[in-house]
Amino acid sequence: MTNGTKPRLRFAPSPTGYLHVGGARTALFNWLYARKFGGEFLLRIEDTDKARSTDESTRAIFDGLEWLGLLWDGVVVYQGANLPRHQADARRLLENGSAYRCFCTPAELEERRREAATGKEAFKYDRRCDRLSREELERRVAAGELYVIRFRVPEGETDWNDMVHERIAFPNKDIEDFVILRSDGTPIYNLAVVSDDIAMGITIVMRGDDHISNTPKQILLYRALGAPLPTFAHLPMIHGLDGKKLSKRHGATAVGDYQHHGLLPGAMLNFLALLGWSPGGDREVMTVPEMIELFSVDGLQKKAAIFDPVKLDWMNGQHLSMIPIEDLEPRVTPEIISARLATEDELVARRDWYLRLLDLLRVRSRTIDDIIRQAKPYFLDDIDYDPAAVAKGWKDPAEARDLLQSTRDLLANVSDWTTEPLESALRALAESRGITAGRVFQPLRVALTGLTVSPGIFEMLVQMGRELSLMRIDKALLVLRA
RNA sequence: GUCCCCAUCGUCCAGAGGCCCAGGACGUGGCCCUUUCAAGGCCAAAACACGGGUUCGAAUCCCGUUGGGGACGCCA
């Protein structure tokens, strides 16, 4: 397919919104292919629709790709900058007889479309302008009448061997003479894409399968322009829980949303990769290098996949526990700082303690947000008490107060603040009271964290230190008295 | 309406003619461990859309039906 030359792929989003998870997945597969087979992964911003394109959106696409680590090769291509070539290509097609001028106005076309719709017929441009006499054509051009350039679709059938679908064929009679250049001289999508892909030397066009119906038109353009065809690969769509194409109404669909909700880019990539691809077998949790290693076109799925945020969270939990703590730290630290739990300097000053904390907390977390939530009691003087935790751990306030008071007295006198002495002291307390250890631990957990979830109680005490632990208990005692 | 694509548990995947009365994961339910848990362990329920072929044999190949999705713009 690439004849020994380096494959060249591209991701070509239009900057009209945010980087969508579907777009991110398309970018990912292009990137994986390039990385796996030693190719180039290029980025092209399709900003030919000036009315809808924004710089802000372009920025969001860069940010999203950078966060995910899907870095592109070479400089970014802005489609709008290629206008002269697009026009030249349109002119070439006009001159070599592949296209013709059409004077039908948008209003006329809309009218005809409406008629076709009411008659329940499929509308297709009837080529009336292709039948204009030479004289009339010249007269109208000379009169300054506006016209578009339409591609003259030849007889026959257009097919290609898709990398994921095998052969796909369209009878040309079902393809209308599509517009390639607007009356204002700007190109239409299909022309701009083909012109740019040729110019960029793209050998593999991998994109969403909503572009399948554009493909025969583009193939016709490649041929008319005398350019070699790339290999096409049409990836399945991503749908929302209702089975429809994923869109804003399905909730968070912007990559940035996940970034800000404490997801790890590696987990996002892993999850996205599994939506429409599988390395075969039961393999699921993978690092990026493993994905590159295992990537293959054979594992690509034809069927649309439904985006399941719950599994994404689970996947993130897996990655949270799996990655080296040194890699996790830089992802969490900015959040710790912006949540005002600590300053950068404070974290640096007790880095070992901090890393141990992260290690303790990540086990029970699915997102970085979970880690931040659980981290609060280790940094803040005052904590909030989760009503659910209070209801469970301090079911009987009088008993809780009594137990906490005893616990406090005991802990104040533990000479060695490490897990073993702490454990034996607390267990001894339970035994002396004739109650289970849990009865002692439960109120203590709520006093220390205010949460229903926490690491093991002894590790937690050690991590908090004597001073903070005792202060927490004192505060709890105060609260319980009220 | 026309054209195109798709079709294995609720969801994501495995399965490329016999290894499958279909396997893994998420989620769900139960049990165990345990000081809690969104952690860990075990178990359970849960699918080859339907109908025809082809074949000794089909989840796997072919055809049709049904269902779902996508595209039909001087948007991309």
Image (tube, coloured by chain):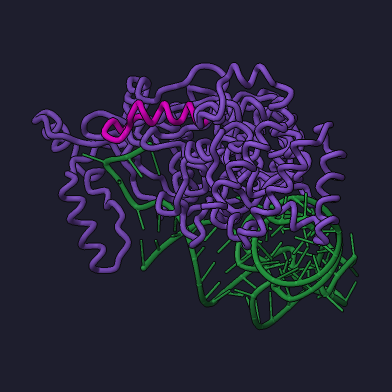
Chain colours: A purple, B green
A33 vs A385: above or below: above
Left or right: where A404 falls relative to A82: right
Q: Is residue A163 visible?
A: no
Quarter residue A84 falls in: top left
Foreground residue among A417 and A177? A417
The reply to whether the magenta stretch includes residue A112 is: no
Foreground residue among A438 and A100? A438
Q: Where does the image place residue A208, in percent across and percent down from the top left?
A: 52, 45
The reply to whether the magenta stretch includes residue A55 is: yes
Foreground residue among B37 and A107? B37
A468 vs A276: above or below: above
Quarter residue A395 falls in: bottom right
Residue at 58% across, 24% down = A71
Segment colored magenta: A47-64
Left or right: where A181 falls relative to A349: left
Residue at 69% across, 42% down = A297
Which quarter of the rendered picture does the N terminus of chain A lie within? top right
Q: Is residue A111 visible?
A: yes
Q: Where does the image place residue A289, in percent across and percent down from the top left?
A: 73, 31
Left or right: where B9 falls relative to A156: right
